[in-house]
Structure formats: C-alpha cells, structure tokens
Amino acid sequence: MVRILPVRRMFRLCRLLQCTLLMGALLVALVVTNIRISKVMDASGGNVETWASHDQTTRHQDVRQGPHDPTIETIQQRVRHVQNRCRGMQGNQGVLRRVYVSEGTKLAYCPVAKIGTTFWKRVFLFLNNDTGLYNVPSPFQIPRSFVHYGNTTNTKVLKRGHMSGAILNRYTRIMFSRNPYARLWSAYLDKLYLPDFWKKHAGKIIKTRTNITEEASKCHNDVSFREFLEYVVSGSKVRKNEHWQPIKYRCDPCQFRPNIVGKMETFSDDARYTLEGNGRGWMLKSFDYDAYVREELTTLIDYNFDVRLGTFLYTCINKTELIRRLWTVFQWNGFLSNNTDATSVVEKLTKMPNINRTVFRKFVLDTYFSAPKMERKKWKNQRQEALIAAYKYIPISLLKSVMELFKDDFEDFGYSNIPPGSEYVAQQ
C-alpha cells in the first residue's frame, strides 16, 4: 500500500533536500578552491608566513663583531621588507631563471649580473669541488674565465620551470641587490665604453642615430651613456640583456623567497655574515679590498686585451686607445687617482719598446700598490663623483623612464629612485 505524505511534510523534505544539495555544492567548491590555492602556493614557493630570514645569531658569537653584529638585524629587516612587498602585490609577473645550489652547505644562490656574481659563483664552485684542473686552496684563485665559461660538472643549477617551493625550501636562499643607477653605470663602462659589446649591442644603438659617421658605422665605438640608457628602457622588460635587466626578471624575490638579502653597497659585511654563518668564514681571510682591486684590474686588462684580438675589434681599437680607456675606467671606479691624466700615461707607456698586456698590467698594479693606503682610500670617492657626473645631463624624461623600468628594484630593496646628484627630479 502506497503511503501518501501530507503536503506540509513534503515541503519540509524538499527544503531539507535543497539544503543538503546546497551544502554539498559549497563543500565541493571549498575543496576545489583549496586545491587551487595549494597549487598557487606551491608554485610561488609556499606560504609567505613560513618565509623567514635566516637567523644565524648563534653562529656569530665568536666573530669580530660579537653577538650584537648589526649585520644580523639589517639582513633580517631587508627580508621582512621584501616579504611585505610580496604580500601586497597583485599578481606576480616576475621571473626566476636559475639558482646555484650547494648540497653540502644547503645554500642556494640566485645570480644577477653586475651584482657580485663572479664572487659567489667562485664560492659555489669551490664548495662543490668543481674547479676543473685548478687545484686551488681558495675560491678566489679560480680563474674568472673558468668561472664563467669553464666546463663545470659538479655544480647543480636549478633552471626556470624546475624550481618548486618544496625544492627551494631545502636551502638557505641568498640573493644580492644593487642600486639600479650604479648597476647601469657599471654595465655601461664594462660593456659599451670598453669594447666587449661593441659588435652586437653598440651596433644596434648606433643604427638609431640620424647621422652616423663612417667610423661609428664600422666600429660602434662611441656610444654615449645617454644613448645606452635610451636603449635600456626600450623594448621588452623580460628579454633584456642580463647585465641591465631588472632584478625582478632575473631573480624575482617573491618566487625565490630569500632568507638572506645582501647588497652590493655592503657586500663585504653581508658576504662575511653569510659565509661565517655556514662555517666558511675562513674563505674571506685572503680576500680584502686590496685583493678585490687586484682582481678587478687584472681581469679587466686581460679580458679586454683578449677581446681586442677578435676579427671585428682588431681594426677598430688599437692598444693605445684600449690602454687609455682602461685607465679612465679605473679612475672612474676609484682604483687609480684622478691626478694622473690618462693621455699622459698613454704617452709614457707607448714610448716603451714592447708595450703589451703584461707590461701594462704591471704598471697599473705598481701604481696602485705603491700609493699610501690612506691615499688609496680617498680614491674610492671618485666612484661616486663619476656616477653623479654621468647622470648630471641625462634628460628628466629619460630618468623617469629608468625609474619606471626599475620601479620594483627600487621598492623591493629599499633604494631611493632619485638619480645621483638629481634630487630635484622627484619633485617634477
């Protein structure tokens, strides 16, 4: 016998069924949403709440600064600043391209050109016993040519698309920043004032001119700093050369989530903090400022003398002009005194019967190390003076384009976007 339910009760059952279906739909939606959130968090490296600065305080008890090493607090503040910046971002358009790792020390380093990359690559090759035929007692004795172009086999490099948050979380993550204005000036000196990039990038810049001289058309040897900046701010942000590409598109901090944020401006202190905290502070005992200058002078001389021998450059820059440009760069970088004119140095050297890289290298190093230490210390001020002079006559419109391109670098790492010596720009 079929039992017919009262109408009122049937309505109640229908409402109950509707509620049950609605609750089920809500639960399914929550589950799907949670899965999606989990995927996003994994892609970005995990929950930012677990992203903390690397506290190495206990390992710094016996170092010269003692337990109150100010570098500890400074680095922790930088990490918190980057973390807060990443939390507030709507979407993430940055790129994480590659990361060097050391399994023995559980360190991971994200390189950005013109921000101490040679130093850290040397350290990681040494930590990984990946020095090729060079059996050296210190990472800073590994030749720079091997560091950048050698056949390394033991050093693990994580590539773009193969770095999940779970993988990166295994390591203490290190990255370094640099004031964008100083980084651009350094890139110009090394790559466009000196002949390294004359063939490719300088050639592209020269073609934008209305009137091109025959020599410039052939050699691309007179690109100005203003022309270089105009070239930098044009085109895609993602496809720029690594030497002047914003950090966000080489080593996006929101994806890398650094535990240690160092700066080029405090490089020695930050490198010391990092290495001492991992029991490798002894590496820096033979690497002071004088050792750094010796390395820079020697490398730039040897590298550019080699570059000049190439087919394209051999007829475009002779030894005399190369020596003049190198000497000028050394002065702008604060390695040699401004009191000695580059032209007079060239005249003196060219009178020697066999001027070559060896003779020039010895002359430069003797000039540096023969000066009193206090005098050499004063030369460092020339770097900032040259930087200010470089930006002095750059148009405001172009400076604003630089500010816009490197906006995230300025804000992520706490740099003022006011160009050197151009305080008035911020008020325009």
Image (cartoon, rainbow, N blue to C red):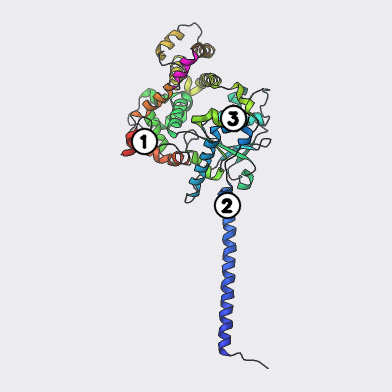
Please tell me in which quadrant of the rendered image residue 424 appears.
top left
* Image location of residue 16, percent across then percent down: 58, 79
Dot 1 alpha-carbon crowd within 10 angstroms: few under 14, some 14 to 19, many 20 or more: many
Q: Where is residue 146 in the image (x, y as percent from the top left)?
A: 61, 26
Residue 343 on the magenta segment: no
Nearest the eye: 356 or 389: 389
Seen in the image, is 414 located left or right of residue 5? left
Viewer-proximal residue among 189 and 182? 182
Kind of residue sitting beneath label 1: Leu
The residue under label 3 is 66
Mark 2 and mark 1 lie on one chain; the one further toward the N terminus is: 2
Q: Which of pointers 3 and 2 indicates the residue nearer the eye?
A: 3
Labels 3 and 2: the sequence-earlier one = 2
Q: What element carries label 3?
A: helix
Q: Is residue 196 above or below residue 162?
A: above
Q: Is residue 102 left or right of residue 265?
A: right
Q: Mark 3 touching mark 2, by CB under 8 A?
A: no
Q: Residue 399: give its label.
A: 1
> In the visual, does 49 lie left or right of 105?
left
- Tell me, yes or no, if residue 114 can be seen here: no
- Examine the rendered structure and indicate whether residue 356 appears above or below residue 239: above
Residue type at the position of mark 3: Gly
Q: Which percent across, then down, holds residue 257?
A: 56, 43
Estimate how packed mark 3 is, as few (under 14), some (14 to 19) or many (20 or more) residues with alpha carbons within 10 Å. Answer: few
